[in-house]
Amino acid sequence: MKPDLQIQEYQRDSEMPASGITVLANESLYALQNVFELDGRVSCYPANASGYSVANCYLIREGDHALMLDTGYVAHEREILAQLAALLQPETLLSVFPMRLNEYMSVCNVESIAAEFNVVQCYSGNPDAAKWVDFGGKSDGAGHGSYTLKTTLVGRAETLYVGHGKQRPLVAFQAPIRLIGTRWMYDETTRTLFTSDMFSHEWSQSADGPWTADASDSSTTAALMRSFLLNTRYWWLEGGETSSLRRKLGDVFDKYDIETIAPGYGRILCGREIVERQYKLMDEVLRSLDKTVVSPKYVNRDDLR
């Protein structure tokens, strides 16, 4: 079943779809969801995809501390600042964690958020995170105050904590399947797995969503998931050695008690039934793409598979 969801709307203007806050766990976990149209220009979706999807940033809150996963696109800057203002107090100590340090969705609004809120650190596997997020580009201009970005290094697998002491553990680790440097994260408190650019294949034909899905309203098949992967950044999977990827993915789903899959894009998958089904579909697709089943081939950039 879906969690008890509440939506707060932030309308950009009369011609743009509404974005909003989805409450995944009251006072604890929020999705900041901002709508964009699928018209062939969004590289994280197939060129022939049509309809609408959302860019998801997540806010994990514990007492007077909060952690933001990804910071969204510049096009959604105003909405994201308004969403954060609705969720944070002036005294809240906010940390940010770009899940994909070399991708716009993760890094675009770090400086804008730091200018408006009490950002105390940026988690990163790279000590030069400030450069990667272009921190200082705006503050160099007239009218901007001076502020710095503290970087807290995160290893390949590490437990972070939100709140005082160690009351809210979050396990950050390298994504088991990735093209670029990508982190996943597991939140034991809400049983949520944050999967960055994986499991992002659910979108909508309507600008109004819905932007969550449970087992009753998901029609994803293995064929659809396979096509999605091969027509986005996972084109290289066909004819590759996927058995090790299957083992790594299986280890994650065996180790953690997962009730929600929270991707960086698209509908959030809510409930054990849909989580188990989506994992099984992904495993089936990876098995079908292994080099023992199919041969690798050159793929023209305009080919749709």
Image (tube, rainbow, N blue to C red):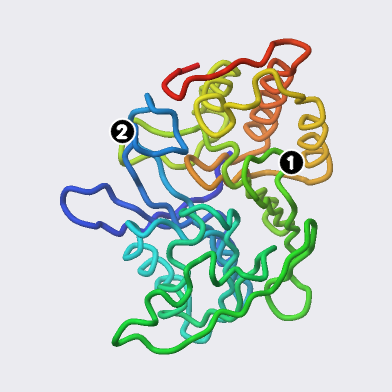
Question: Of 269 and 153, which appears nearest the observer?
Answer: 153
Tell me how far mark 1 sits from mark 2, CA to CA. 29 Å
Discs 1, 2 touching: Cβ within 8 Å: no
Name the spot of residue 129 as percent of width and height, x first. 59, 68
Question: Of 229 and 68, which appears nearest the observer?
Answer: 229
Image side of residue 169 versus residue 100, left or right: right
Structural crowding at the residue carrying mark 2, measured as other residues with C-alpha within 10 Å and reported as few (<14), some (14–19) or many (≥20): some
Circle 2 sits in a helix, a strand or a loop, which is it?
A: loop
- Of mark 1 and mark 2, the one earlier in the sequence is 2
Q: Amino acid at mark 1?
A: Pro
The vertical placement of 121 against 24, above or below, is below
Question: Of 226 and 107, which appears nearest the observer?
Answer: 107
Structural crowding at the residue carrying mark 1, measured as other residues with C-alpha within 10 Å and reported as few (<14), some (14–19) or many (≥20): some
Q: Quadrant of the N terminus?
A: top right
Circle 1 sits in a helix, a strand or a loop, which is it?
A: loop
Tag shown at residue 39: 2
Name the spot of residue 106 as percent of width and height, x first. 51, 57
Name the spot of residue 52 as percent of width and height, x first. 35, 37
Q: Quadrant of residue 143?
A: bottom left
The vertical placement of 162 against 143, above or below, is above
Name the spot of residue 16 as percent of width and height, x first. 22, 49
Q: Amino acid at mark 2?
A: Asp
Question: Of 238 and 208, which appears nearest the observer?
Answer: 238
The vertical placement of 280 against 295, above or below, is below
Residue at 51% across / 36% down in the picture? 213
Residue at 53% across / 84% down in the picture? 148
Tag shown at residue 176: 1
Residue at 66% across / 23% down in the picture? 281
